[in-house]
Each structure stands twice: as C-alpha cells, then as structure tokens.
Image (spheres, rainbow, N blue to C red):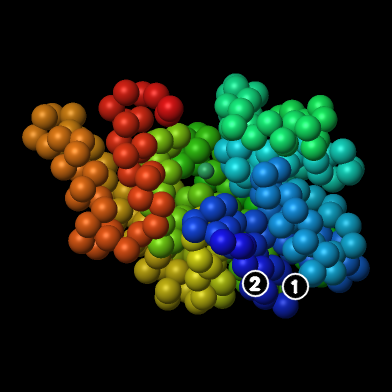
Amino acid sequence: MKSIIQAIGRSAYCIIGPEGATNFAIIKANDGSAVLIDSDIRRIDEIEEALKLTGCREIKYLVNTHEHFDHTSANYYFARRGVAIVASRGCVQAMKKDGEKDFARMLAPAPHIYQRFPGIRMILPEVVFDNTTTVTLPGVSLDIKYCAENGHSHSKGDTTLYFNEDEILIAGDLLYTEVHPVTFFGNIPNWLTTLKPLFQTHYKQLLPGHGPKVEGQQAGRAYFKKMYDYLEDFYAHLQEIKSGRKSAQDVAEYMMSGVYASLGKTRMVERNIHQFLTGRWY
Ligand SMILES: [Zn+2]
C-alpha cells in the first residue's frame, strides 16, 4: 500500500498514511518555502517525494503535533538541514523524559535506518511555546495551540494547527478517522475534555492524525463526535473489566463489532486493553 498525497487547500497538502499510518501535512508559502507538520524517518522517502511533487523549495519549519515517534522521528533529518522545529512545552518535556527510550525501542526492528542515517537520534524541538503561537511565511499564518487537558490527553504534547488562509484544521492524534485510536499513551477522561471544544471549531478541511481527511465542518463535527463516543464507550468498558463484570476478551470483541466493525487497525484494541490492565505498553 502506498501513501496518498492530496491537496487540501490552495496551498496545503496532506500525505495520508496507508492503512491508518500517520498523516503528514505540507503548507506551502507564496515564495515556495514551506511548513511541514509531523514526520517519520521510516517514511522519509514519501515525505521527500511529496515535497518535490508539491514544488516546495525549502522547509522553514517542522511542527511536531506531539511527542510520539511516528510524528517526531525525522527531527534529526530536518534539524541537520537547518529546519526550525516547533513544539509545545508539553511535547518537549515528554520527549526529554521518554523520547530516547522510545526512539531506541521503535528503531530496534529497523537497523537499516541507523545504517542509512548514521548518528540518527532523538532531537528535541528548539522553538518551544506554552499555550499558543503563530508561524508565518509569505501568504501563510498558522495558529498553533496546545490542547492537552491538564498536560495529558492523547499524549502530553497534543497540539492542533489552524491554517488561516485555507481554513484547515490539523487535529493531530486527538482525532482518528475510520481506524481504532491508540489510547495506551493517553488519559482518556482528559482526552474527552479536549475534544468537546473541537466540536465547535471552524474549518473547511480537517486532517486527523491517522485515517482519511474530512471535508467540511458538518462531516468534521460528526467525526469528532464519533471519536468522543468511542473513547467514552471504551473507557466505560475498561471500568467493567476492572470491576470484574467483563473479561478483556469480551471487551475486545465488543470494540471490534457493531458500530466499530468497519474500523481499521484492529490490533490496537488488544494493545489498548493490555496497557490499561498492566500499565505496560509492550
Ligand atoms: Zn500519537
């Protein structure tokens, strides 16, 4: 399966990961410079190809929507090229705490990455903001907002971006469409609180962290609501496992049937439950 590159505005593009793999976005300025949102070293060729196809001359900023490896692991690659890397303080603190361990764990099955990029390591973003910031390039103003409730929703760094000129909302992993979410790094009750105000936001196009993009605010609201209902339902079922009323197996089956039967990345369901029960991710 290949990624799909789609235009999501006059000067914005998204790279939709195959089978619910991570999405990336490119915002192109009038002078051919650009902002890249998220990047994964394992998919650097796709990102480079997309930058070429969209005619981007130079990346000025790389924004990390949050600390997870699949969103930050090409920081080294772009930092070496002089790109300024932007992230919330929550994201940077989480990377300082667990980033190196995570980096080694995620790259253990991919030794070819170390061969291809000698010296590659976790690189911390150096343009750090607390609550909000705006990145500007000619014809581009990008409002960046830290959204993790009490410092922890899907992740500790959760950040949304709004590209004013093209009216595009980039939700990061606060939103998954058509695939099961990863909840095992998160705090589900806080994540629910973060989602509520997103029901009311304005945009023409909406890009989730994983899964297909969404056109229009009405469809977007429905997806945010689906995400909310999924997390609320899953959390209630996790409590039933805890209290002994249901088995992990019952809940896994439930989360893969009925309204959830069509969702992709079903392997995440068991991992999410496992982490909840054991406190371990792997
Ligand atoms: Zn994530």
Measuring from the top left, give residue 191's x and y in whole percent.
40, 44
- Determine which of the numbered discs, if any, sits on residue 11 in the image: 1
Instruction: Describe residue 3's horizontal placement relative to residue 233 as left or right.
Output: right
Q: Quadrant of the N terminus?
A: bottom right
- Secondary structure beneath dot 1 equals loop
Q: Quadrant of residue 199?
A: bottom left
Structural distance between the alpha carbons of marks 1 and 2:
11 Å
Task: Look at the numbered disc 2 and say if its residue's Cβ is closer than 8 Å to ligand 1.
Answer: no
Instruction: Describe residue 61's horizontal placement relative to residue 46 as left or right.
Output: right
* Residue 150 in the image: above or below residue 31: above
Task: Tell me if mark 2 has few (under 14), some (14-19) or many (20+) residues whose alpha carbon lies within 10 angstroms of its own.
Answer: some
Name the residue: 57% across, 38% down: 68
* Residue 3 in the image: above or below residue 249: below
- Determine which of the numbered discs, if any, sits on residue 124 in the image: none
* Residue 161 in the image: above or below residue 217: above
**Amino acid type at mark 1:** Ser
Name the residue: 44% across, 65% down: 200
Q: Is residue 142 visible?
A: no
**Amino acid type at mark 2:** Gln
Instruction: Describe residue 208's horizontal placement relative to residue 72 as left or right.
Output: left
- Secondary structure beneath dot 2 equals strand
Q: Quadrant of residue 93?
A: top right
Name the residue: 77% across, 61% down: 49
Measuring from the top left, give residue 27's x and y in whole percent.
74, 64
Q: Is residue 37 visible?
A: yes
Q: Which residue is mark 2?
A: 6
Instruction: Describe residue 24's horizontal placement relative to residue 211 as left or right.
Output: right
Q: Earlier in the sequence, mark 1 or mark 2?
A: 2
Between disc 1 and disc 2, the foreground one is 2
